[in-house]
Image (cartoon, rainbow, N blue to C red):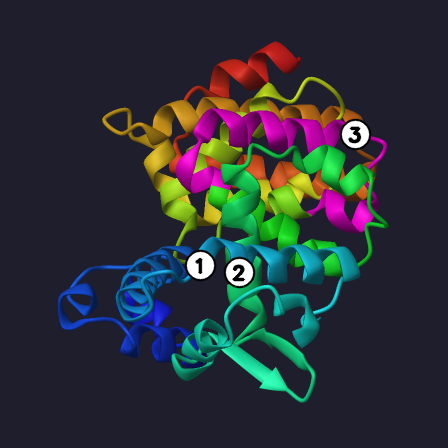
Amino acid sequence: MTLELLRTPLHLSVFSRLSASARAASYRTLQELYARYTDELREEIETQAAALDWSGITGALCASMSERETLQAPMALLDGFARQHIKVFESHGVLVRDAEQVGFFHETYFDYLFARSFVSAQEDIHDFLAGSGQYLFRRAQTRQILEHLAGTDRDRFRVTVAQLLSSDQIRPHLHDQPTNSSMPFSTAGLPDHLEHLVSALYEHTVSLPSVAIDSCERIVQHAGKEMGDLRTHRAADGHHLISAVLRLYRQSPQPERIRCLDIIDLLAQAGAYPLTDALENER
């Protein structure tokens, strides 16, 4: 998993900053890599500057950037913090200054820190999105928040996905985030979180958005054969997935119905349980 993750230059750069013992561990996602990087970095920085306010500095920047929907903030925002503490952040490569503006070393680290703070504070992503302009800046934030929930709070993740998918207050370009392949189920992370997404689709009580078909296709690509093996927990996922695909078939126009039938064919080839009984009930 780690080798696949490190094919991306940014990920390799972050990995190279870890201690030798941390580099010996396995990482499936960028979120896991950032979590370890942050823990080690924060410990090192706070050792050098005991009174340094990590949460205050990063929190102020994340809040300002999110509110202004930009990846930089005015240096004046940090006037309330000791200058030597800001310089410690800069010397460790966490913050990058550009004249009177400052930002994190990469936009994905801002997204990670924002999501971590957002989830820890028990904020509601639906209310957050409904109360904002829902422009493209919110897409990455939405992906990171859902990825963080998928990794830390399964029940809350499922409830949140169902809420976002069913809400008429959420714009279409954000509706696809709960089922988008890049969030929270990247090629590396999908196998570990697959059951959460399947459950969320199954528990969704109103019409599923058409983008849910994309998600069903990716799920079958990753775990189709296992869904026919009763010795694995994927068999239960198969039951939930079959239910979601049949619901999509019933509610969709002809082009999407054809895609649903293609998914059913793949499930049949995998021997997914209990496809035969489900199809009989559809007659």
- Does residue 172 appear left or right of residue 147 in this picture? right
Residue topped by disc 1: 54
Q: Is the magenta stretch mostly helix, strand or loop?
A: helix
In the displayed orientation, state which residue is furthest to the bottom: 99
For numbered disc 1, what is the local secondary structure? Answer: helix
User: Which portion, as a residue range, is magenta?
Assistant: 149-176
Q: Distance between the residues labelled 1 and 2?
A: 6 Å
Residue 280: where, in percent of width, then height? 57, 13
Q: How far apart are marks 3 and 2 (CA)?
A: 31 Å
For numbered disc 2, what is the local secondary structure? Answer: helix
Residue 268: where, in percent of width, then height? 47, 33
- How many C-alpha atoms fall within 10 Å of the one at disc 1: few (<14), some, or many (≥20)? some
Is residue 189 within the magenta segment? no
Residue topped by disc 2: 58
Residue at 59% in and 44% down: 215
Sooner in the amino-acid sequence: mark 3 or mark 1: 1
Q: Please determine whether, in this image, residue 282 is positioned above or below residue 15.
A: above
**Number of labelled discs?**
3
Residue 181 in view, yes or no: no
In the foreground, 49 or 194: 49
Numbered tag placed on residue 167 in the rendering: 3
